[in-house]
Amino acid sequence: MIGLIQRVSEANVTVSGEVIGSIGKGMLVLLGVEKNDSDIEIEKLATKLSRYRMFTDDDGKMNLNIEQVNGEILVVSQFTLVADTQKGNRPGFSRGATPEHGKAVYEKFVECLKAKGLTVATGEFGADMQVGLINDGPVTFQFQV
């Protein structure tokens, strides 16, 4: 499982011209699911993100987590994160989950974040989405679990 995390002042996801998910201050999570991902990876990444201190305190230091800033999370599935780009001029997706497994993991991940008391908005798994964001910083981290 790969999570590309961006600290945002706002973000939204649009499908067929309609905004289906939006947040204010918080984090945008672009989530790539691999074929062997399970509840272990879901819990590990959700816990990491809920505790990760990527928001600034009064001294300008990254000392605060999402809960401490009353932030929100927007989770968007992005299978291209698991692409093999080492060979040739076209990405390979052999590490990626099947659509059925990917959707199940994605949905469990969202529920895991909500169970931690976080406010979560989502995109639509498998849809052609347009993602809009204002990256605050810019601050971007990549996690692989």
Image (cartoon, rainbow, N blue to C red):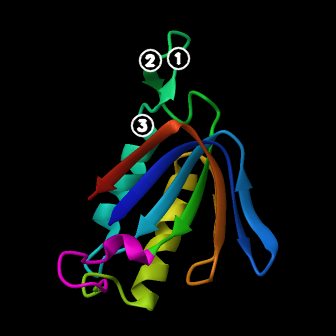
Q: Which callout, 2 or 3, points to the residue nearer the camera?
A: 2
- The amino acid type of the residue labelled 1 equals Asp
**In the image, is residue 81 part of the stretch drawn in magenta?**
yes
Left or right, residue 99 beside residue 19 = left
Left or right, residue 104 beside residue 69 = left
State which quadrant residue 51 falls in: top left
Residue at 62%, 82% (x, y): give it.
128
Can you name the residue that lies furthest to the front here?
Answer: 89
Q: Are marks 2 and 3 in contact (CB under 8 Å)?
A: no
Q: Position of residue 68 (x, y in %)?
A: 56, 27
- The amino acid type of the residue labelled 2 equals Lys
Q: Position of residue 101 (x, y in %)?
A: 40, 85
Q: Position of residue 83 (x, y in %)?
A: 31, 77
- The amino acid type of the residue labelled 3 equals Arg
Q: Position of residue 89 (x, y in %)?
A: 28, 84
| Residue for badge 2 | 61
| Residue for badge 1 | 57
**Mark 2 → mark 3, Cα distance in angstroms:** 15 Å
Q: Residues within 10 Å of mark 2 (few under 14, many from 20)?
A: few
Q: Nearer the viewer, residue 12 or 70?
A: 12
**Mark 3 → mark 1, Cα distance in angstroms:** 15 Å
Q: Are marks 3 and 1 in contact (CB under 8 Å)?
A: no
- The residue stretch that appears in magenta: 79-91
Q: Which callout, 3 or 1, points to the residue nearer the camera?
A: 1
Q: Are marks 2 and 1 in contact (CB under 8 Å)?
A: yes
Please give the label number shown on residue 51. 3
Residue at 25%, 76% (x, y): give it.
85
Can you name the residue that lies furthest to the right here?
Answer: 18
State which quadrant residue 144 falls in: bottom left
**Mark 2 → mark 1, Cα distance in angstroms:** 6 Å
